[in-house]
Amino acid sequence: MKKIFLLFSSLCVALVSLAQNENDVVFTYNGIPVTVKEFTKAYQKYNLNKNAGQSEAEMRDNLMMYENYKIVVAEAHAQHLDTLPSIKAELGTYRKQLAKNYLVDKGMLESIYKEVFDRNQYEVEVSHCVARCAIDASPKDTLAAYTKIKNMYDRVVKNKEEFAKVATESSEDPSVKINHGNLGYFTAMQTPYAFENQMYNTAVGNVSGIFRTSLGYHFIKVTNKRPAQGQMLVTHILVAAAKNANAAAIEAARQKANRIFAAVKKNPAMFEVYARDSSDDRQAAQNSGRLRWFKVNEMVTEFEVAAFALQNNEDISAPVKTDYGFHIIKRIDRKGAETDFAKSRDQIKKLIDKDARFEEAKKAYLRHAKAEANFVQYTENLVAWVSALDSTVLKASFKASMNNVNKTLFKLGDKTYTTNDFANYVELSQRTPSRRSYTNSQDIALRLFSLYVDKCVMDYAENNLEAKYADFKDLMKDYTDGMILFDLKEKNVWSRSATDTTGLKAFFQGHASEYVWGERLEANTYRCATNEMADEVIANIHPSFFKKIFAKKKIMSVEQMKLKYNTTDHPIDFSMDAGKYERGNNAYVDSAKAKPGIYKVYGADGAYHIVQVKKVIPSTVKSFEEAKGYVIADYMANLEKTWMAALRDKYPVVENKSVVEALMKK
């Protein structure tokens, strides 16, 4: 959409009143009418400053722009640019992306967004037991996992055994020996959706029912619920100590961490320096130890607890031991959970679009789409076809050519889908369901049939989006027109202006007097962190000064000054540039007089700036190379003007004067 946005960004006009007859014709181009309704719609969509009033001259300019837009699009269609393979491919990609937002139950999505927002106001502490079981496990393995979780569940619920004891003895969570089933606090979007639903729908102190996720069978106990702690932003210094390190290595790391802690407590300004130069977290060190914003359960427990315990920005924790070593944590900022749904909706939407919840909204849409398309299934034909299968589907060696009877399987709208269609799908997709879940070809085929129906329904719905949604149709038209317009202008104006060297130089020669340097100062500029440094720099660049103040010292070169003034802790205290400066191009050079000399000024950046004017260069005509950027821009404007004049001759524009005058008065 960026291309369209750029093309319309100049159409910032006041909205046209709908009190006018929307079917009145504003103008025609090559006999094709543009109505008030179309004109108004364009402004409603692309006007970037809807509250600003515009003069009649500005409105007339924008009317001309819209006329030109319609003419260029007409020429692009006349050249059939929309049939170019590159354009068709990009349009196909865009259509897929755009369709994604229509092929879901939008009402359900809004409910999901609000659900996530509401849940994010709280954090829930949970313990759990799990019996691991792959989502596509065989019936035998599935039964074994369920039997195991049911046994654990009965021990907790019926026999009243302690949850932690049962979890420690029987749960298949790798961390259970350490946490005894207690997972800590979670908020929304941090666990599988099924797990989260149980977490928020189970009362504090209660145990959920048995449920399944992609990991296996679970049940949980909710042990606490509290208002969300929000998010924390910190920087840290890590002194690494491996989890399995010997006592001497751990003690050495502890002592080093204590020394650093003492240093940064004494001089907090040095924290980022240590984090950059001494921390063993080298990735964070590249950003002076700063980590990303984090919520509960996104860091190891000890780190999280210590970070959230810091009460104020700039507070620094004592060394905190984790499995990674010793951390010294400095709080940068903290923010609570967002309490305004409207402000958080867009961010939640981005997360949901990548989450399993989005699939729930797709499934809901699928049900509606199937009903709208009057889906009819011919079950007897499906059963007959599936029953005739041999073991080839189970072995993933089925060929569509093996299908020798073509019967109708189902209908969507006016389209019929046959056993031949399905056979082709089976040949291409027979490996999709995991083999270990099935014992015969018939079960696999029925699963594939379910997937095939869903695919066909979605394809049918997607192919009919323009007919169902006017805004989808408009967006596709706008994007198509924008792309082909961009392509046409690229060839006729933009690329030509940059590559037509002969034309560029001829244009420059005809307009050379327009490209002129103003008076310039040839100067060296120096930036110094302190006044003392500035005086010393002046002495080094002013020989008579130097002899008076530093009689026993040698004059330093710029490189020597850089080595002296720029240290590891202060790498940019001193810098130097040289150039030719027009007035208005450098504020510090502007403060100097138009004659050779040395000038010192205190800058808004808190540093001292020295300007050494070496020469005053009078106004002069620019060379082609010096003016090239401006020449290209002006040549481009000239090319476009000439090209548009030719197009307006080819597609004559006739304005309806009475309608245009009425628009100008609104």
Image: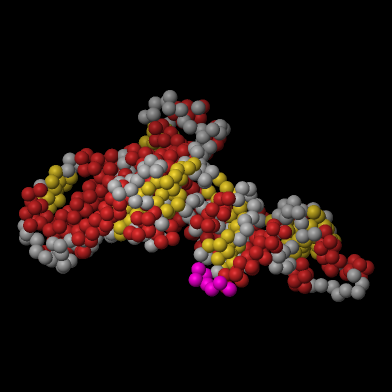
* Residue 246, magenta (yes or no): yes
Residue 62 versus residue 492: which sits nearer the camera?
62
Residue at the image point whose x is 73% and y is 67% from the top:
566
Which of the colour schemes (rainbow, by chain, secondary structure, one colour) is used?
Answer: secondary structure
Percent coordinates x, y for residue 337 in the rendering: 51, 43
Residue at the image point whose x is 6% and y is 54% from the top:
384
From the viewer's perspective, tell me whether residue 82 is left or right of residue 375. right
Q: In this rendering, is residue 531 above or below 473?
A: below
Tell me which segment is drawn in magenta.
Answer: 242-248
Residue 389: quarter of image: bottom left
Q: In this rendering, is residue 68 above or below 261?
A: above
By secondary structure, the bulk of the magenta-drawn segment is best described as loop
Percent coordinates x, y for residue 122 in the rendering: 46, 42
From the viewer's perspective, tell me whether residue 343 is left or right of residue 155. right
Residue 172 appears in the figure: yes
Residue 76 appears in the figure: no
Residue 269: quarter of image: bottom right
Residue 457 versus residue 390: which sits nearer the camera?
390
